[in-house]
Amino acid sequence: MGKLYIVATPIGNLEDITLRAIHILEKVDLIAAEDTRHTLKLLNHLGITKPLVSYHRHNEEIKTQALIEKLLEGQDIALVSDAGTPGICDPGEVVIKKCIENKIQIIPIPGSCAMINALIASGITTREFIFLGFLPLNKKLRKEKLSEIKSSEKTIILYEAPHKLMATLNDFKEILQERKMVLARELTKIHEEFIRGTIEEIIEKSENIKGEIVLIIEGNPKSDRNKSYEELPLEEHYQLYEEQGLEKKEIIKRIAKDRGTNKNEIYQKFIEK
Ligand code: SAM
């Protein structure tokens, strides 16, 4: 049985490809590419000649069956997208699920990913984050996502197209007000740029901005979740953790953390009650 390699390719600078990725592209029987013309340019740059088949959003279902048959016959296949890591806002999911069903081995070959590079250089905490891809255009879904962004304590990462940037930033201004954010543009390319500031400042600095964009938004330091804990009666708060089977000491510790206070104060409140 063949293997499916999920190979990350550069997001701009062609030097951002690993030795392992090159080796895999050289040795597989076939490369499934989002846009064969785009991948051909990369292969020409690397001096690799290999049969290519197209595998993109609109033919993902149909092409999957043909790829699975080839894998079952014993051919090794590399899956690549136009840029970065396949499956991250790019095709990949369908064939990967089918490979799992057919017990075909899947091997990820790590490399560039725009959201990770934007995040690590943003200066906004990397400890916990949520990647939301592109914001939906559908009004209802968009509203839901914006409210998720508003309440999230975690750093938020989004992809955005330059012609939709202003509409998105204005939506942010309306719901997030003074939140800190970073606009990372043209990563690994000549015009790579990081614009840092409040949403208002980013709006001022990014008029007519072009190129590929990642947006990083600081998490809400006082999220709705925390607010609702504060509003919760102490007994109910205690019960919440008791039902999870936690010990008294641990429960008090967590309540104190949720309410932004110390353990002694919580003990004192219980004694008073
Ligand atoms: N699979 C890719 C990855 O691993 O990042 C993402 C593909 S998605 C279709 C394309 C979006 O990724 C762009 O619209 C942009 O938001 C982001 N992106 C890709 N390359 C970028 C770059 N060099 N600089 C900034 N953002 C980039």
Image: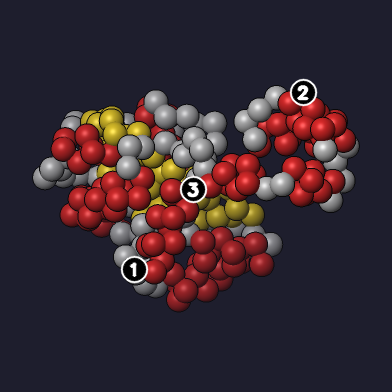
Front-lying residue, 7 or 162: 162
Dot 2: within a 10 Å radius of its alpha carbon, few (fewer than 14), some, or many (20 or more) residues? few
**Residue 86 at least partly seen:** no
Q: What element carries label 1?
A: helix
Residue indicated by mark 2: 264
- Of the numbered discs in the image, which one, if any, rests on residue 151? 3
Q: Residue at x 79, y 27 (%)?
A: 268
In primary-sequence order, the first of circles 3 and 1 is: 1
Count of labels shown?
3
Q: Is residue 8 above or below residue 124?
A: below
- Residue flagged by tag 1: what amino acid is it? Lys
Rendered view: 54 above or below 183: below
Q: How far apart are marks 1 and 2 (CA)?
A: 47 Å
Q: Do the residues labelled 3 and 1 touch (CB within 8 Å)?
A: no
Residue 43: where, in percent of width, then height? 32, 46
At label 3, counting other C-alpha atoms closer than 10 Å, the crowd grade (few under 14, some 14-19, many 20 or more) is some
Marker disc for residue 121: none
* Relative to 233, 87 lies left or right: left
Task: Reply above or below: 171 against 138.
Answer: above
Name the residue at 18% across, 32% down. Answer: 191
